[in-house]
């Protein structure tokens, strides 16, 4: 499971300079392989949100609105979609794999699933904030995270990092990031 614990979260850190924390953060994220959504004409501006706890959904609400303001298309899991729609944030519902599989046994079809959206590359950013960090159990969240990593789709699993990323892309595009010598900072 690509969710990092305390020990691994600090391993392989990257430091970058910028005129402010947003520029430095984006440079650091790009230096470790993050492709900014919409950074080329062939790249969509869309993301998959799956946020477990209601407290985290409430905390992230203003950032989801910022994504809409930045012309992002939001796909979200059932509970997250319901919360967003109740708070006037447009989102397209995608079903959890486990719910879709249960519905198939009843003769129902719940689609698209999270995997459908990921495997068809309809999203270019995944924000998955787990309810808990249990590694023993294979969950829908695990399937989202594992598939995103396998398909090389940027994955954010920390609420504060997701919020800072959105603030940063709100402020800077790829072309706004300048390379300067150390002495210029």
Image (cartoon, grey):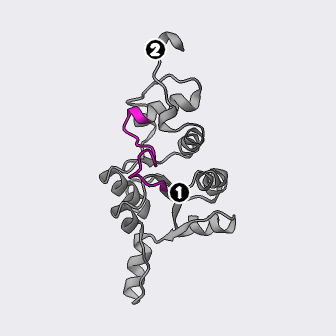
Q: In the image, 5: left or right of 74?
A: left
Residue projecting furthest to the left? 150
Relative height, residue 149 to residue 179 (above, below): below
Is residue 137 visible to us here? no
How many discs mark residues in the rendered view? 2
Q: In the image, 74: left or right of 62?
A: left
Residue 118 on image: x %, y % = 38, 61
| Quadrant of the drawing holding the C terminus | top right
* Real-space CA distance between mark 2 and mark 1, rounded to the nearest whole angstrom: 42 Å
Q: Secondary structure at mark 2?
A: loop
Residue 126 on image: x %, y % = 45, 53
* Residue 85 marker: none
Q: Which residue is mark 2?
A: 181
Q: Which residue is mark 1?
A: 131
Q: Please give the name of the residue rendered at 50% of the width and 9% of the height, measured from the top-left corner.
A: 183
Q: Quadrant of residue 143?
A: bottom left
What range is drawn magenta here?
30-46
The earlier-in-sequence mark between 2 and 1 is 1
Residue 151 on image: x %, y % = 31, 54
Residue projecting furthest to the front? 41
Q: In the image, 38: left or right of 91?
A: left
Residue 36 on image: x %, y % = 45, 43
Magenta stretch: includes residue 42: yes
Magenta stretch: includes residue 33: yes
Of residues 137 and 184, the one drawn nearer to the viewer in this rendering: 184
Of residues 94 and 2, the one drawn nearer to the viewer in this rendering: 94
Q: Quadrant of residue 23?
A: top right
Q: Main secondary structure of the magenta part?
A: loop
In front of the other: label 2 or label 1?
A: 2
């Amino acid at each position: 499971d690509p969710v990092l614990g305390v020990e691994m979260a600090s391993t392989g850190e990257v430091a970058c300079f910028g005129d402010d924390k947003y520029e430095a953060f984006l440079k650091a994220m790009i230096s470790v392989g993050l492709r900014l959504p919409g950074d080329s004409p062939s790249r969509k501006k869309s993301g998959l949100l799956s946020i477990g706890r209601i407290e985290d959904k409430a905390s992230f609400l203003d950032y989801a609105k910022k994504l809409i303001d930045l012309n992002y298309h939001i796909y979200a899991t059932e509970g997250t979609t319901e919360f967003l729609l109740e708070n006037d944030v447009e989102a397209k519902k995608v079903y959890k794999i486990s719910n879709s599989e249960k519905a198939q046994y009843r003769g129902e079809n719940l689609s698209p699933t999270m995997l459908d959206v990921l495997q068809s590359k309809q999203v270019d950013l995944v924000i998955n904030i787990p309810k808990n960090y249990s590694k023993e159990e294979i969950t829908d969240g695990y399937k989202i995270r594992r598939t995103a990593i396998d398909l090389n789709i940027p994955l954010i699993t920390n609420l504060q990092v997701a919020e800072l990323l959105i603030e940063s892309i709100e402020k800077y595009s790829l072309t706004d990031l300048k390379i300067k010598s150390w002495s210029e900072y």
